[in-house]
Image (spheres, rainbow, N blue to C red):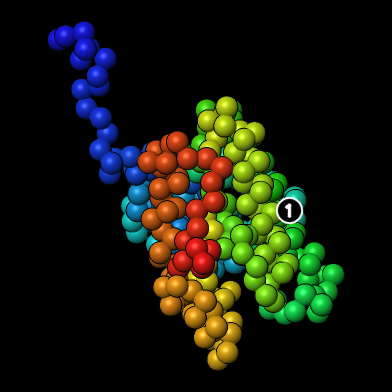
Amino acid sequence: MSEETADIPAKLPSVFEQFSLAGRYALVTGASRGIGRVIALALADAGADLALVARSADRLEQVAEEVRARGRRAITVTADLVKMDELTRAVEQVYAAFGRVDVLVSNAGISPIWKRSTEVTEDEWDAIFATNVKANFFLCTNVAARMVDHGGGSIITLASVASVVGTPRMAVYGASKAAVAQLTRTFALEWARHHVRVNAIAPGYIETDMTSGVLEHPYFGNAIRQATPLGRPGKPEELAGIAVYLASDASSYATGQLFLVDGGIAAE
């Protein structure tokens, strides 16, 4: 063997091997339905074992059965992450079961109102920020501190196209998701030296229970389709690929980024 080839690995991992999550443990919040369910199943398909967290025990167990049908281990934790004691308990239960978390998907969020800014109440503001920002912040910091002790990991937050473009009648939701995007960048800078990567997925309008009211509205639903260059809302399954990418070694040099999956809305 020549000196020029002595340090070349015998075999580099293929691009497909880089996407494997075999032997890794993932925690997904808001996992009982919609985007959270789809991401959880995608991570299971890539080889991860799953800790599923949500407020609905029945729906959560259904998703757990779907994960197990794929040959992966799944545990469920019912918790309201807005309540700090329940958030802490949920994380402790996951670590008691798995010993570590390699991937965190902080997906839980709400968008309960569609109204003009002048009509928003203080209680509505507080509820949205408590779920989308406060719970997200303390979940990420709680898990990241433990990831540091285990040599690193990948954290994926769920922002929104509303993080970067104005969205009439969604001022509070947009502000909360802009906060998520900024937290993501700051977390990435703080934890990079500990090999904890933090990135955000920023969806456009996705067909879920949360968006069904506005997407089915005869005026607003049509306006959203016209404002989306691809001419339609997305499906939760269209976020599966980016989630696996960010969770896996395929994205090992990506951190602090906002990945828009919005049908082209932010490009205009």
Q: Is residue 89 visible?
A: no
In depth, the one of 105 and 195 nearer the eye is: 195
- Residue farthest toward the left in the current orientation of the protein: 1
Q: Residue furthest front?
A: 268
Quarter holding residue 56: bottom right
Find the residue positioned furthest to the bottom: 218
Question: Which residue occupies 33% across, 39% down?
Answer: 18
Question: Which of the 4 quarters of the picture holds residue 93?
Answer: top right
Q: Which residue is mark 1?
A: 134
- The residue at the point 82 percent across, 77 percent down is 118
Q: Amino acid at mark 1?
A: Lys
Horizontal side of 143 relative to 21 (left or right) equals right
Q: Nearer the viewer, residue 7 or 81?
A: 7
The residue sitting at 48% across, 46% down in the picture is 26
* The quarter of the displayed image where residue 242 is located: bottom left
Left or right of 88 in this view: 198: left
Q: Residue at x 56, y 42 (%)?
A: 256
Report the quarter where the N terminus lies: top left
Q: Position of residue 77 (x, y in %)?
A: 58, 55
